[in-house]
Structures are given as C-alpha cells and as structure tokens.
Image (cartoon, helix red, strand yellow):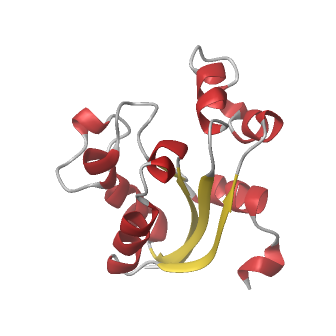
C-alpha cells in the first residue's frame, strides 16, 4: 500500500468539549503520523472557500456558521492508506449510523456537529492540505 497524506479537522464542538487530546491519541494509536497540527479560528470567508463544493446545498450556510463558531484543530496526517484509515477511524458522517468505537459515534452530536472532518480522496486531500498547510510545513 502507498503512503498517503490526508487532512483531519477537529471541529468546534469537539474542541469546546475538550476532546482534542482524546482524538489526537486515537490518531496516534491508529498508527497515523501527525506531520503538522494547528489550532485556528476560521473566518467566514475561509470556511466558504474551504466548503465551496457544498455552496448550492441547503446546509452550506449553517455549516459555515458552525465551522466559524469556535476554534478548530487542523492536522496533516501521513501513513500507509492514510485516507481510508482516517475515514474508518472517523466513522459514518451521521454519528447515529457510525460504527461503535469510531470518533463520530463517540463524540459526534448530529450529522453536522460530528466532531471531525477528513478528506474523501487523494485529490481532495491534496487540495485540503494545501489550504491549511504550505508545502514547507509538510516536509
């Protein structure tokens, strides 16, 4: 399997509930390497740009409002088959449908406030990583 890089975001509801350490611990226990980590507060413009793919969907503005409601932690992860492995650790988008023990099952509140985000494929990972981390941060 190929070594991949992917983006992870710990969303505002998980940061507010002091779950950053628990989530980072699970990432490391899963054998994913953290290349970079930063806490930040997204501006509305940044959130709109990042989630532009959803611009025409009815949940776009509520998503922007949620993602700008408090700080997030963004991480660049690396490992063999990292995209799939991170997505499995996250669980289904809807916490009610996420497998037991996954991050969203444990910490998600609903489909929007689901604690974590992850890239869904290699092209998305490249775009999302470059949005938050200059190439020099990921050397």
* Percent x, y of residue 31: 38, 81
Above-or-below relation of 66 to 43: above
Front-most of residues 63 and 119: 63
> Total of numbered circles in the picture?
0
Above-or-below relation of 112 to 80: above
- Image quadrant for the N terminus? bottom left
Front-most of residues 1 and 10: 10
Front-most of residues 113 and 4: 113
Q: Is residue 12 left or right of residue 109?
A: right
Q: Which residue shows up at 72% across the image and 38% down it?
A: 47
Which residue ends up furthest to the bottom in the rendered image? 139
Q: Can you tell which quarter of the image residue 81 is in?
A: bottom left
* Percent x, y of residue 120: 52, 50
Q: Is residue 89 left or right of residue 47?
A: left
- Image quadrant for the C terminus? bottom right
* Percent x, y of residue 63: 59, 28
Q: Which residue shows up at 34% across the image and 35% down it?
A: 109
Q: Which residue shows up at 77% across the image and 78% down it?
A: 137
Q: Which residue shows up at 39% across the image and 64% down it?
A: 23
Above-or-below relation of 22 to 118: below
* Percent x, y of residue 22: 36, 66
Q: Can you tell which quarter of the image residue 96 is in?
A: top left
Which residue ends up furthest to the top in the rendered image? 58
Above-or-below relation of 13 to 134: above
């Amino acid at each position: 399997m190929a070594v991949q890089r992917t983006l992870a975001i710990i969303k505002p509801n998980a940061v507010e509930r002091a779950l950053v350490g628990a989530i980072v611990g699970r990432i490391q226990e899963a054998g994913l390497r953290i290349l970079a980590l930063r806490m930040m507060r997204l501006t509305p413009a940044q959130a709109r740009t990042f989630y532009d793919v959803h611009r025409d969907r009815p949940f776009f503005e509520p998503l922007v409002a949620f993602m700008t409601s408090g700080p997030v932690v963004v991480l660049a992860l690396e490992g063999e088959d990292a995209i799939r492995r991170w997505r499995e650790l996250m669980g289904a988008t809807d916490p009610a449908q996420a497998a037991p023990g996954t991050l969203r099952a444990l910490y998600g509140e609903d489909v929007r406030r689901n604690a974590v985000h992850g890239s869904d494929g290699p092209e998305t990972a490249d775009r999302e990583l470059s949005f938050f981390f200059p190439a020099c941060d990921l050397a």
